Amino acid sequence: MGSSQSNTHTVTIDNDDLSTIQVSKAVADRLTKGLQTSDSSSNTKPEKKTEQSKPVNYNIPSSALAGNTQYISSLDIQKHVHSAIDENNKYWENKVKSINAANDKVTDLMNKEYERTLREVEVILPHVSKEKRANPCVDMKEKVLKCYKSNPKQSLKCLEEVNQFTSCILDTKA
């Protein structure tokens, strides 16, 4: 292994038409076999086929080999690749549409469930209007604000008022 040098083989082809590359049928067959064998060798682990992965067929179309033509032009290959890409794009567009439709269904279901639960909670816990609610510890709050205003650079002097306000709030919550 590796003891012999590999020889490079150079082929020169005169091509008057620069927009096309002609490939013989034998070369095209070898290329497509190489793609097929590399695909099969890369899948050595058995995988479950899911609906999400759809293989795209990049094989050279047999219509390009129709008749007595021995060569496939690069234009034919390019057309085939573009059609395969378009097919793949359509597949994934449909997939995204179906996922969005499923998401919309789930969203509608969740909104309905939210509304139902909200109605149940409103029955169990009646709504209290703002007029009936009393603001707790208003006088303590005003004492804290007054202390902070009178001692703007010495806030620690207001520690007693803050502690009284905190305990008032905690008592109200309990």
Image (cartoon, rainbow, N blue to C red):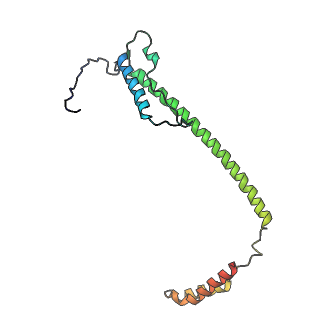
Image label count = 0
Left-right relation of 68 to 88: left
Residue 96 seen by the camera: yes
Residue furthest out toward the front: 1
Measured along the vertical axis of the image, is residue 83 above or below residue 115? above
Left-right relation of 87 to 174: left
Residue at figure coordinates x 68%, y 78% from the top left: 173
Measured along the vertical axis of the image, is residue 39 above or below residue 139? above
Asked which quadrant contains residue 90, the reply is: top right
Asked which quadrant contains residue 30, the reply is: top left
Query: Residue 108 placed where, x, y %?
Result: 69, 48
Left-right relation of 110 to 120: left
Residue at figure coordinates x 46%, y 28% from the top left: 82
Q: Nearer the viewer, residue 51 or 134?
A: 51
Residue at figure coordinates x 41%, y 32% from the top left: 41
Query: Residue 32 placed where, x, y %?
Result: 40, 24
Residue at figure coordinates x 79%, y 65% from the top left: 124
Residue 24 seen by the camera: no
**Quarter of the rendering occupied by the C terminus:** bottom right
Query: Residue 170 placed where, x, y %?
Result: 65, 81
**Quarter of the rendering occupied by the N terminus:** top left
